[in-house]
Amino acid sequence: MATLNAEHINPFLMSAKKVLQDTCFVEIGIEKPTLKEAKFASDSWVIIIGITGEMRGQVLIAMTEANACNIASKMCMMEVTQIDDFAASALSELGNMIMGNAATVFSSNGIGIDITPPTLSHGEVSFTSNYAKSLCVPLTLPDGKVDLFLAIKQDD
């Protein structure tokens, strides 16, 4: 299995940081990455986006219901107290923006990837990947956090 290095991880981190800062108008911190099982509690919202091309796998963007409402509120510029269809659409678009930005960075580095449309999951769920371990990078907002899970590998 090919191992991921900083040049494979940083485009996702920088894209997530930039998009969250630009859409939520807050500073984003990046905490230390860890290998972690992609397992989520009942109050979780997870944006799932697949990657194909020269790299394969999936990216999960996970947050609690409170953080999802907070992010959707900032994106929609109105108070969101529950994730309805409108807020769910905003969260899915957040995933599209992050991954589209990352795909552009990879392309400029000579690595071609495509992304799948986002799927939004709510509730208690876990994901297992047999081909790549999940690297979890917590991204901190002033009033919450988002966990970015990367389960990807580059084709040999």
Image (tube, grey):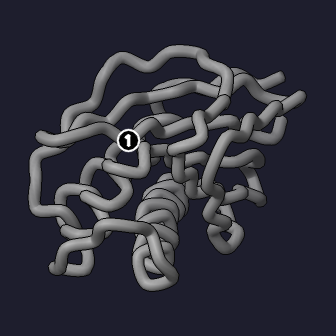
Quick check: 103 above or below 89? above
Mark 1 Cα shell of 10 Å, populated few (<14), some (14-19), many (≥20): many
Q: Toward which corner of the image does residue 116 lie, by quadrant? A: bottom right
Label 1 belongs to which residue? 146
Choose top left, top right, bottom left or bottom right for residue 15. bottom left
Front in this rendered view, residue 65 or 71: 65
Q: Secondary structure at mark 1?
A: strand
- Considering the image in quadrants, where does the N terminus appear? top right
Q: Is residue 148 left or right of residue 18?
A: right
- Where is residue 39 drawn, in percent x and y? 66, 30
Residue depicted at x 58% and y 34%: 41
Q: Residue type at mark 1?
A: Val
Residue 14 spot, x, y in % from top left: 32, 46
Q: Residue furthest bottom?
A: 86
The quadrant holding residue 139 is top left
Residue 103 horizontal/vertical position (percent): 53, 62
**Residue ID at (72%, 23%):** 133
